[in-house]
Amino acid sequence: MSAQNHWPTWAPRARTRSRRRLLRLVVVCLLAGALALLGVVAGGIWWGTNHYGDQVTRIPDAFPTEPRPPKPPSHDGGTTFLLAGVDSRSKQPTTGSDATGRLWRYGAQRSDTLMLVHLGADEQNTYTMSIPRDSWVPIPGHGSAKVNAAFSWGGPPLLIRTVEQLTGTRIDHFGVVDWHGFKALTDAVGGVRVTVPADAYDPEQDQHFSAGTQTMHGDEALAYVRQRHGLPGGELDRIERQQQFLQSLVGEMRDEVSITDPLGTSRMLDAITRAVSVDDRMSNGDLRNLVLGLRHLDASDATFTTAPIVRPQMIDGQYTLILDKEKLRAQWRAVETGHPPGGQ
């Protein structure tokens, strides 16, 4: 009889058990290695956001000292940001760590873009309301004027106070970027893809835009989001463009932020640091949570709308927009309490 026929019957089962034990050992080692790697990467991001957080330009005394609106009892626990794009007349950067000019001087800058953003407590959704620059609103201590004059007359504190008074909400954090910073952020992500719905020409900037989906970089992107002359809807069309662009930009930034891509995260943090200034109440922990929270957001999680408008109206020779203040407050209260209305 051959040796093969004399092989013990238990031997194949033993080899099978041995292979299974080896496989389990390999799987356990791989899992342990993966967890260790994620721990190192996550630790690197924790260090990186602290490192870059220390370099983020903080705006001292950004908030008003006057009494401010309380949060509603049924507040969802999320965070409300006021984001401003500043049309600075300075040829030097005025926001972020690249700034060599002053953020604010009386009469030298206006808030060309203004967005109220609410990030849900679960960081799974955002709601953004644009406030048109031509909105005619009460500005504390100055009577009524276009909302973009608030920053010009009193910097961040007056702008925040004006928006809080208008909306009835309490703003948690404030961020501002000038046009130098906007171009830098756009270029940092390799340009932003936007879809131009129709051919357009801006006579003020002498700039043509061709219909179709394309990637825009610094100067062209800035001209695109600033155009309102030559658009059928004027300021409202411009707001729609800005919201579309912001949504695409955040998507590009989100793709750069990943616990498995510390280099991409580092590049994005560096770009944000160089371009954006925030209030001095925003801690490094707040910044870290915000950056990592970008990982969870995509286009379907973001809702964009515009402050409700009653009518356009000429006041003192100026084109203005009259807002529906009560409807605006009701909409934002719904957002803060976890029942946001659909986008307009």
Image: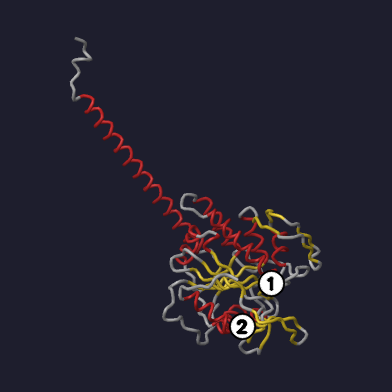
Mark 1 neighbour density, 10 Å: few (under 14) some (14–19) many (20 or more): some
Whether residue 102 is visible: yes
Name which quarter of the figure residue 233 lies in.
bottom right
> How many numbered marks have been drawn onto this rendered protein structure?
2
Q: Residue at x 57, y 70 (%)?
A: 343
Percent coordinates x, y for residue 319 in the rendering = 74, 81
Q: Is residue 140 above or below residue 148?
A: below
Left or right: residue 23 compared with residue 255: left
Percent coordinates x, y for residue 108 in the rendering = 70, 77
Residue sitting nearer the eye, 325 or 138: 325
Left or right: residue 107 compared with residue 251: right
The label number, if any, that marks residue 324 in the structure image: 2
Q: Is residue 166 above or below residue 21?
A: below
Mark 2 neighbour density, 10 Å: few (under 14) some (14–19) many (20 or more): few
Q: Are marks 1 and 2 in contact (CB under 8 Å)?
A: no
Kind of residue sitting beneath label 1: Leu
Residue sitting nearer the eye, 162 or 341: 341
Q: Which residue is mark 1?
A: 236
Can you say which quadrant of the picture contains the N terminus?
top left
Residue sitting nearer the eye, 4 or 154: 4
Can you say which quadrant of the picture contains the C terminus?
bottom right
Percent coordinates x, y for residue 113 in the rendering = 65, 72
Q: Residue at x 45, y 81 (%)?
A: 72
